[in-house]
Amino acid sequence: ETAWQRAEYSQRNSIPMSYSPDNYRWSCGILGIPAKSLQQLKFVQPSLSDDDTHTIDLQQCICKIDSTVFEGYSFSPAQDLVAILSKTMRGESHAYNVTFRSLSEDKPHPDAGSPLVKALDNQIHPQLFDSPYTQSMIFGDYYGLLCKYAHKADDELVDLLQIWNWKSKEASPVIFLTNDRFLVASARELKLFSLDTIDSVNAIRLVARFSFPALRDPFIFHFITFSPIPFHASAHNQLIAINMCMSAPTTNKSPYFTFYIERNTLLELESTYISRYGEASQDSPSLPWSAWGPKYTRFFENSYNSCTHRIFGFRSAELIGDLVSRDGVLQPRPLRIRDFNPHRVTDFKAGNLSTSHQRLVEGESPNSTLFLDPLGPGLPYIETISQEKFLANDMTMEANRITLLSLKVGNSMYDTSQSIEMLDFE
């Protein structure tokens, strides 16, 4: 904990990379990289090969892909699983093929109910379907797929959200899952659903609805996303990060905010909703922002930055500022660590923790005229900023480690090489 409190790592290890990652994803300390020119997905895990010299190796697995139809992928190292999303030919009755393969052996996963599943079958317009935004995820036994602005079979333009048990031979589509409760974000609210299994059939039930803070005209919520949660941490209370991008026809600027809320708080708000409105339905009102947001959330205004709001448990990490300066030069940035653990906040207030490198933040929220509703003080935290700066364009966070995709600049901004750097906080 002392290393986190001082934002000073105990070890730093790096290894150069011979290729430039694109469309990469992190999971459990493993980096997934599509190498389309090689018709393959690479999965790279940096690990210490010598505790004395602190040199590291890159353990690597490869899965073959067809780059002409490759659309995306998700993977779960804990389950030795990679799910590959591929587009179908125009005129087909389904939008995508999803294949479930072994991460380590590049063959059909032995636990998959079917090695290939047709996604959005008989739900799309066979000639017009072309979703500009797709996102997929794996959560335990479930695989979920989101397609925005897609043409349905009746030519209506909608957002499609589908999930199924990838271990089941009967892939019954349902909606996004988080254990037996799952969140769906719309342009105005959060919806909390439950997933009940009745006679081996998945049944979905709307549990509660929570309004977002109102925006000033003419701004609207352009899109809402969730920061990923590590699968192995999903059973415990932790921070949930909800990202909000706004837009308006009168400006080309898109304000971008993120707010945090504890996972258990969202689940407990279910009883608050029911006590006020009874059983939820599609026509029932939403719990107003004033009844839950100001007290239980913490807002941050963001720049478009690939190194913000990396979360593990109650701790978040980010690199402060823009990677590219106003002069068009790549610039190193300091590391900021925020600790929202309520017990540590209490200890800090009581004077039981060192304050030389830290400060307590409470009662502050973004001073924004964009919102009609007050954002409120919510969620106090302890902030630590490193003295050292890092030149990196992406990062991931684990229990005792931050892994950076670091940059080294050659003769120009466009002459850069990348390496993986591991910062151990132990």
Image: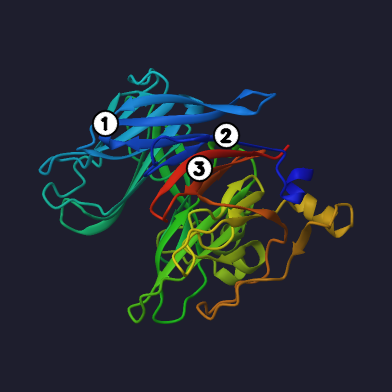
Q: Amino acid at mark 3?
A: Thr
Q: Do the residues bearing badges 1 and 2 touch, measured as CB atoms within 8 Å?
A: no
Precedes in sequence: disc 3 or disc 2 = 3
User: Quadrant of the image for the N terminus?
Assistant: top right
SS type, badge 2: helix
Q: CA distance from mark 1 to mark 2?
A: 30 Å
SS type, badge 3: loop
| Dot 3 crowding, Cα within 10 Å, few <14, some 14–19, many 20+ | some
SS type, badge 1: loop
Q: Amino acid at mark 2?
A: His
Residue 178 is marked as: 3
Image spot of residue 401 (x, y percent): 64, 39
Image spot of residue 45 (x, y percent): 51, 29
Q: Which residue is mark 2?
A: 232
**34 to 352, vertically: above or below:** above
Q: Which residue is mark 1?
A: 39
Q: Which of the two marks, 1 or 2, is nearer to us in this view?
A: 1
**12 to 225, vertically: above or below:** above
| Dot 1 crowding, Cα within 10 Å, few <14, some 14–19, many 20+ | some
Q: Amino acid at mark 1?
A: Gln
Task: Decide if residue 5 is in sight here.
Answer: yes
